[in-house]
């Protein structure tokens, strides 16, 4: 199964999704990039191995949950016909006409679209029910729809506050959502691995910018890093936990010639090996302390952090006293039944 969410915010539409997939075959690797054990669940084996966000035109992208093969067939047909459709709803008639669908292999899509004139649309489509007529501004699909209510309320609180720039909301939201994969055993709910996102605004699709995740222990020890970048509709993850790079793409939205070229891989590796990342997310493995560091000037040295990647999964990480103090701040219990967490945000 899947975790996928979509929402409207300030003239943009956002989609985020995890990278885990449930399948009958044993996993090719033991752990996800974040150290989650690829073990068996009641539905089979869950492994970090799939990109579930698919741009199908300049201003439209789709996130999906459900049967991967069926979803691929539906989305592929939508992409082939998007230029001929008058609207998203008109396009989805093609998906309806592919039915009837097997209830045991159901699919749910979240379609995010925008036009050059500034209009935006978020539509939920289900292979068994068709288009959701509620026209909600927020949807959550997949395995976590019945999970802790705080999961949804955290999204809504950010959306209601309305004080974030559209290019900053993805890393802010994802820093919180990704922390659930560190604190909770979500892989038992068929969810796991990297959670990444994109948004569409004024007729263009934009992937989340390059992000470093730093996972640390109670004494700022047992530190791991996971780097994630998007290039040409491909997600590349480098993890000190697995000591390898992993490439996730979907055949519908990727040019295989591009990602297998030596020049493309060289440029990707240069970025992975650098510390020039726009966003740094620090997550404590003991408390729900989440710190988002935003680097505004990538040409200058950071005043908070420096990372040098060595070999065999080893690295040198230097952090300023101010950042260390921030990472050690205790979580304040809200005493309202919700799961307490602290989200710190700093501009660099």
Image (cartoon, rainbow, N blue to C red):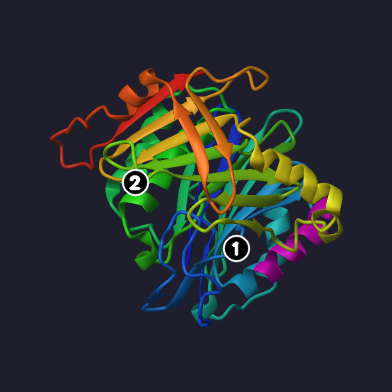
Report the side of 304 relative to 53 (left or right): left
Return the x and y of residue 44 as percentages of the image width and height: 44, 79
Task: Kindly indicate the quadrant of the structure image that contains residue 345.
Answer: top left
Task: Tell me the CA gap for discs 1 and 2.
Answer: 23 Å
When the figure is inspected, residue 76 is found, relative to residue 44, above or below; the finding is above
User: Going 45% across and 59% down the picture, which residue do you hit?
Assistant: 192
Return the x and y of residue 241 as percentages of the image width and height: 48, 55
Given residues 68 and 132, the one toward you in this image is 68
Q: Earlier in the sequence, mark 1 or mark 2?
A: 1
Return the x and y of residue 180 as percentages of the image width and height: 36, 49
Residue placed under numbered mark 2 in the picture: 151
Using the rendered image of the protein, determine whether residue 163 is visible from the camera's viewpoint.
Answer: no
Q: Is residue 137 magenta?
A: no
When the figure is inspected, residue 112 is found, relative to residue 292, above or below; the finding is below
Q: Is residue 77 magenta?
A: yes
Residue placed under numbered mark 1 in the picture: 50
Other residues around mark 2 within 10 Å, as few (<14) / some (14–19) / many (≥20): some
Start-end of magenta stretch: 72-84
Return the x and y of residue 102 as percentages of the image width and height: 55, 81
């Amino acid at each position: 199964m899947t975790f996928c969410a979509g929402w409207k915010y300030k003239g943009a539409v956002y989609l985020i999704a995890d990278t885990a997939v449930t399948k009958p075959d044993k996993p090719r690797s033991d752990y996800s990039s974040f150290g989650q054990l690829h073990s068996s669940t009641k539905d089979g084996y869950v492994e970090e191995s799939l990109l579930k966000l698919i741009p199908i035109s300049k201003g439209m992208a789709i996130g999906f949950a459900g049967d991967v093969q069926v979803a691929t067939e539906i989305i592929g047909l939508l992409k082939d016909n998007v230029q001929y459709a008058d609207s998203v709803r008109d396009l989805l008639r093609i998906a309806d006409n592919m039915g009837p669908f097997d209830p045991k292999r159901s699919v749910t899509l979240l379609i995010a679209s925008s036009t050059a004139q500034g209009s935006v649309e978020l539509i939920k489509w289900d292979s068994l029910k068709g288009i959701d007529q509620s026209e909600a501004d927020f949807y959550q699909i997949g395995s976590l729809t019945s999970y802790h209510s705080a999961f949804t309320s955290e999204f809504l609180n950010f959306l209601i506050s309305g004080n974030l720039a559209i290019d900053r909301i993805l890393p802010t939201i994802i820093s919180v959502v990704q922390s659930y994969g560190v604190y909770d055993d979500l892989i038992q709910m068929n969810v796991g691995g990297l959670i990444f996102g994109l948004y569409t605004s004024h007729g263009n699709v934009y992937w989340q910018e390059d992000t470093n995740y730093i996972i640390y222990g109670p004494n700022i020890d047992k530190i791991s890093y996971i780097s994630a970048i998007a290039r040409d509709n491909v997600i590349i993850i480098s993890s000190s936990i697995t000591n390898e790079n992993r490439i996730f793409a979907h055949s519908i939205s990727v040019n295989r010639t591009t990602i297998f070229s030596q020049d493309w891989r060289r440029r990707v590796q240069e970025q992975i090996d650098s510390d020039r990342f726009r966003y740094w997310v620090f997550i404590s493995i003991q408390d729900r302390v989440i710190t988002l560091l935003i680097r505004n000037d990538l040409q200058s040295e950071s005043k908070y952090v420096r990372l040098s990647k060595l070999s065999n999964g080893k690295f040198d990480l230097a952090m300023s006293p101010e950042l260390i103090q921030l990472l050690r701040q205790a979580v304040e219990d809200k005493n309202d039944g919700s799961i307490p967490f602290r989200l710190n945000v700093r501009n660099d």
